[in-house]
Image (cartoon, helix red, strand yellow):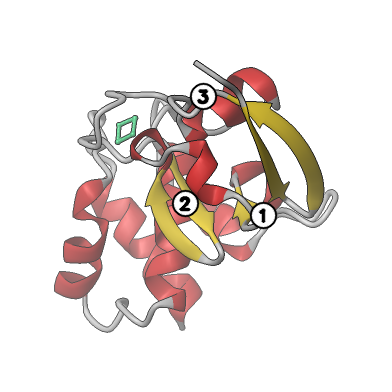
Amino acid sequence: FEKMPVNITVNGAAHKLSIEPRVTLLDLLREQLHLTGTKKGCDYGQCGACTVHVNGQRVNSCLTLAITVDGKKVTTIEGLAKGEELHPMQEAFIKHDGFQCGYCTPGQIMSAVACIREGHAGSEAEIREYMSGNICRCGAYPNIVNAIQEVKN
Ligand code: FES
């Protein structure tokens, strides 16, 4: 496949890249930019482990072709903390044990931040509905909800 020029800002850093049209944003982040915090669970839109923000909106990066992100801003889990200072949602996940094995956690946290930002954290049911695309095989759901409710308040 012929490569195409793409300009993407990731966590505040501008990247001029040349990529094949078939490359997903997930593979671009992990394999070309070496940002491996974003996880590949299913690679077909079922698990949410690959969740990132594009221009502030959450997306499944495994379902997003990297060329469609040309000119946009991407935030990954690596971009949430300010230096040594964790994002409040990261602190809340630690405080409430919002993870066990941790594989789904980057995606859970990116969705959790978007949940509040987009105004879907009104009730526990609303939070669970918004977060339903992020699967946790360890079953940390109640603790994840608690973390979101704490940050919301
Ligand atoms: Fe993208 Fe599972 S890896 S939804």
Disc 1 to disc 3: CB gap under 8 Å? no
Quadrant hosting residue 114: bottom left
**Mark 3 or mark 1, which is nearer the start of the sequence?**
3
Q: Which label sits on residue 80?
A: 1
Residue 26 horizontal/vertical position (percent): 48, 31
Q: Alpha-carbon neighbours of circle 1 within 10 Å: few (<14), some, or many (≥20)?
A: some
Q: Amino acid at mark 2?
A: Ile
Q: Amino acid at mark 3?
A: Asp
In the displayed structure, would residue 105 be above or below residue 12?
A: above
Residue 28 horizontal/vertical position (percent): 58, 28
Left or right, residue 127 beside residue 99: left
- Residue at 28 percent across and 45 percent down: it is 134
Q: Which label sits on residue 60?
A: none
Any atom of ligand 1 within 8 Å of the CB at mark 2?
Answer: no
The residue to which callout 2 is attached is: 109
Any atom of ligand 1 within 8 Å of the CB at mark 3?
Answer: no
- Residue at 33 percent across and 52 percent down: it is 143
Element type at marker 3?
helix
Left or right, residue 27 beside residue 145: right
In the displayed structure, would residue 29 be above or below residue 118?
A: above
* Measured Cα–Cα span from mark 1 to mark 2: 9 Å
Disc 1 to disc 2: CB gap under 8 Å? yes
- Residue at 24 percent across and 29 percent down: it is 44
Left or right, residue 21 beside residue 140: right
Q: Alpha-carbon neighbours of circle 2 within 10 Å: few (<14), some, or many (≥20)?
A: many
Q: Alpha-carbon neighbours of circle 3 within 10 Å: few (<14), some, or many (≥20)?
A: many
**Mark 3 or mark 2, which is nearer the start of the sequence?**
3
The residue to which callout 3 is attached is: 27
- Residue at 30 percent across and 61 percent down: it is 145
Q: Amino acid at mark 1?
A: Leu
Residue 5 horizontal/vertical position (percent): 68, 36
